[in-house]
Amino acid sequence: MRLSSDRHRALIGRLLEENSDFRIQWAEHAVERFASRQRVFEHPEDGRRVFEHHSLVPSDAPGLSVVMYVPV
């Protein structure tokens, strides 16, 4: 579901009406879009692994996303 779609706006409207916790979080802008960032994982055998986490959307397929974890 795209953030600008009618379905998304309808869902947000229903949640704002029916859920006070959601209403507070939405007003505080605690809901954010995806942003590239660093991710750290603790592997049981290989120890600490650090990656850059990216999500790419192909211009010819806006309904898809490609998630990449790039070793740092």
Image (spheres, rainbow, N blue to C red):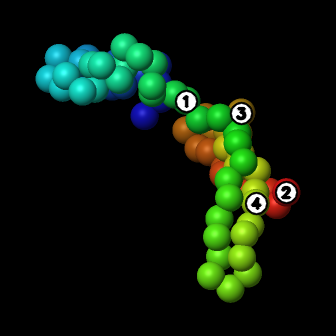
Q: Quadrant of residue 24?
A: top left
Numbered badge on residue 59:
3
Task: Say whether marks 3 and 2 touch (CB < 8 Å).
Answer: no
**Label 4 belongs to which residue?**
50
Which amino acid type is marked by label 2? Val
- Residue drawn at point x = 72 percent, y = 69 percent: 48
Front-most of residues 60 and 3: 3
Q: Quick check: marks 2 and 4 in contact, CB under 8 Å?
A: yes
Q: Quadrant of the C terminus?
A: bottom right
Residue 3 in sight: yes
The residue to which callout 1 is attached is: 33
Q: Foreground mark, 4 or 3?
A: 4
| Label 2 to label 4: alpha-carbon separation | 6 Å
Q: Nearer the viewer, residue 20 or 70?
A: 20
Mark positioned earlier in the residue sequence (2 or 1):
1
- Residue 68 at least partly seen: no
Residue type marked 3: Ser
Spatial separation of the CA atoms under disc 1 and disc 3 = 18 Å
Q: Is residue 71 left or right of residue 60?
A: right
In depth, the one of 1 and 51 nearer the eye is 51
User: Circle 3: is it few (<14), some (14-19), or many (20+) Cα within 10 Å?
Assistant: few
Image point 65% across, 35% down: which residue? 35
Q: With respect to residue 5, does 67 lie above or below?
A: below
Q: Which residue is mark 2?
A: 72
